[in-house]
Amino acid sequence: MLSDSVMEIKGVGEKFAEDLAALNIYTISDLLLYFPSRYNEYEIKPLSELIHDDRVTIEGRVVHEPSLSFYGRKKSRLTFTVIVENVAIKVVMFNRAFAKKQLHADDVVTLTGKWDAHRLQITVDHYKKGPANTQEEIQSLYSLKGDITNVRLKKTIKQALQSYGNEIEELLPEQYLQTYKIPNRKSAIQTMHFPADRIALKHARRRFIYEEFLLFQLKMQLLRKIKREATQGNAQAYDAKKLQAFIQDFPFSLTNAQEKSLQQILSDMKSPYRMNRLLQGDVGSGKTAVAAICLYAAITAGKQGALMVPTEILAEQHYQSLTELFGDRANVALLTGSVKGKKRKEILERMVNHEVHIVVGTHALIQDDIIFDDLGFVIVDEQHRFGVEQRRTLREKGLDPDVLFMTATPIPRTLAITAFGDMDVSVIDEMPVGRKAIETYWAKENTLERVLAMIEKHVGLGEQAYVICPLIEESDKLDIQNAVDLHNQLQAFYPPEINVGLMHGRLKAVEKDEIMKQFAANEIQVLVSTTVVEVGVNVPNATIMVIYDAERFGLSQLHQLRGRVGRGSKQSYCILIADPKGQVGKERMRIMTETTNGFELSEQDLKLRGPGDFFGKKQSGVPEFKVADMIHDYRALETARNDAAEIIEQNLLEQDAAFAPLKDYLEKNHTYTDKLD
């Protein structure tokens, strides 16, 4: 059986089994699914198809005796010329002095190494006398520990395939194999270890990419179904006519993307299951308008609504905008840490009596003494800022209210549907009509005075500016312009009538709020800050965003910072001051100046940084896959998600015999039976 110990294989003793255990290989199944980490390809291609800097294999005839030179301590360089397709190719080998005695004029050799198309030169890391052996075009290489060698592991895998290969069962229904033109599980495993050629390997990899994604998505969809079915009884019968009248009173029309997201949320509200949805929208895409309509829908259904945000100043801004939007249609209350004593007591009483329809607040909303009469709809803004426990506490204040999480961090859809697999995801990926795009420029540090003069000119027109830098105080380790120094410099540079403020993470929350209020009221014209202004605050009068040492920020963070300006009717600008040394830094600056679409940027950021960095490794929730790569294989991820949704919605695991192997697999891995615990 595949669940047998690896020690059942001939030649695997206790010592070898211990070494295998270090690779998490305990059973025959573990061994067969321990795929190579990379492959060396020795396929010979025509010279015209070779790509500069690629690792290639060529076959040629040696023209003259190799020339050997020594340098440094015991370092050598062997050079000679080979003729390939009547073209002279220069060959360089480092530290292979012994090869001089082996290679002679007119010998045919097969050479593998790094190709330099400009010099017609190959730097060889592997060679053999004689023509290429077509049987060894692709060599599998494994990630190893201890005393295990590549040769011994391959030999053991070969034995396992011979003895146990017929026990490998197919997991996927036949219709999927045919539709996606992928090989069966047994031949795909064989090919992953011993590929006959590149095409067979490509199809075997495609099979396991899809299988890994499908199994993961099935787990997530089952989890979501279990969560949803455990929370019945919150269908909201909202008044569609009142809702339509409310939308028509808006001073603007909804975009198609807003309309689509709104319909998805309203559909969830009507359903008997609790909503668990993530609403993604770029900075300024109009998430708040959609949120307001949904809150009003809950009110017409006789429910109360709550909007929880990370900071007091953000709570005040939402409170003001919702009060204006609703007018006399609804009573909106503000509940933050600053609301105390008699005023707070009065609001709490009105909430219990259902005189308050919507409460906007910070984490003050989840304190024990806060009780709603009938909380039906909860919105959590910038949801990654709140812990799981805080979100759960707010949910428990209603009878399983519908929950909408909102974020302006444009997480690529690929990642959103994976990391938030137990949520539905709605996306507003379209900007409102008439909003001016922020002009973004990349400037070197030696042009700083011109940038400061530009700020002075715009402040003279009554506008304001942010200047962002990475650190608060001088650091020996990093030569980064810091906020305290920069604040002092700008105070000295500008005349006294331009008030330069300073904000950073070490200030208390009350001090930060006070500074932001002064900036919002134009009492501060230029605000020097670390990234604490990243999320939320709306100052329509701020038109310039200068970011110091911009190469030290990720694309998504740069985009979030850029989104602090461009909130009014005036043209806004973002200036990135950076002298990046590496290629990634330069690429980041180029991308920022060329696109203002947050979702495009986040996809690019993902390619530059990888998913772990994108979320922060510790709390990423991003799964590790053996073969699949969420970034490069995102189409397969989308396909697997859609297939998993169909399997769960149509209950195919229970009702269709073709899906029995998948059901068995999920049961063995405890996924399917978790709901019985």
Image: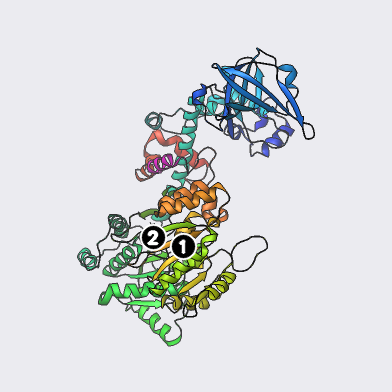
Q: Which residue is mark 2?
A: 438
Q: Looking at the magenta stretch, what is its main secondary structure? A: helix
- Considering depth in this image, is 230 or 541 the residue closer to the camera? 541
Q: Which residue is mark 1?
A: 561
Q: How is the image coloured?
A: rainbow
- Mark 1 against mark 2, which lies toward the viewer? 2
Look at the picture and state if 267 lies above or below 646: below
Q: Quadrant of the image for the N terminus?
A: top right
Q: Which residues are magenta?
A: 631-644
Q: Position of residue 505 (x, y in %)?
A: 56, 70
Q: Is residue 216 left or right of residue 137?
A: left
* Alpha carbon distance from label 1 to label 2: 12 Å
What is the crowding at mark 2: few (fewer than 14 residues within 10 Å), some, or many (at least 20)?
many
User: At label 2, which amino acid type do we have?
Assistant: Ile
Q: Residue at x 77, y 29 (%)?
A: 70
Look at the picture and state if 202 lies above or below 576: above
Q: Position of residue 281 (x, y in %)?
A: 38, 58
Residue 640 lies in magenta, yes or no?
yes
Q: Position of residue 399 (x, y in %)?
A: 38, 66
Q: Earlier in the sequence, mark 1 or mark 2?
A: 2
Residue 225 lies in magenta, yes or no?
no
Q: Residue at x 52, y 30 (%)?
A: 51
Q: Residue at x 37, y 36 (%)?
A: 656
Look at the picture and state if 229 lies above or below 104: below
- Considering depth in this image, is 446 or 526 the residue closer to the camera? 446
Can residue 232 be seen? Answer: yes
Q: Position of residue 255 (x, y in %)?
A: 28, 57
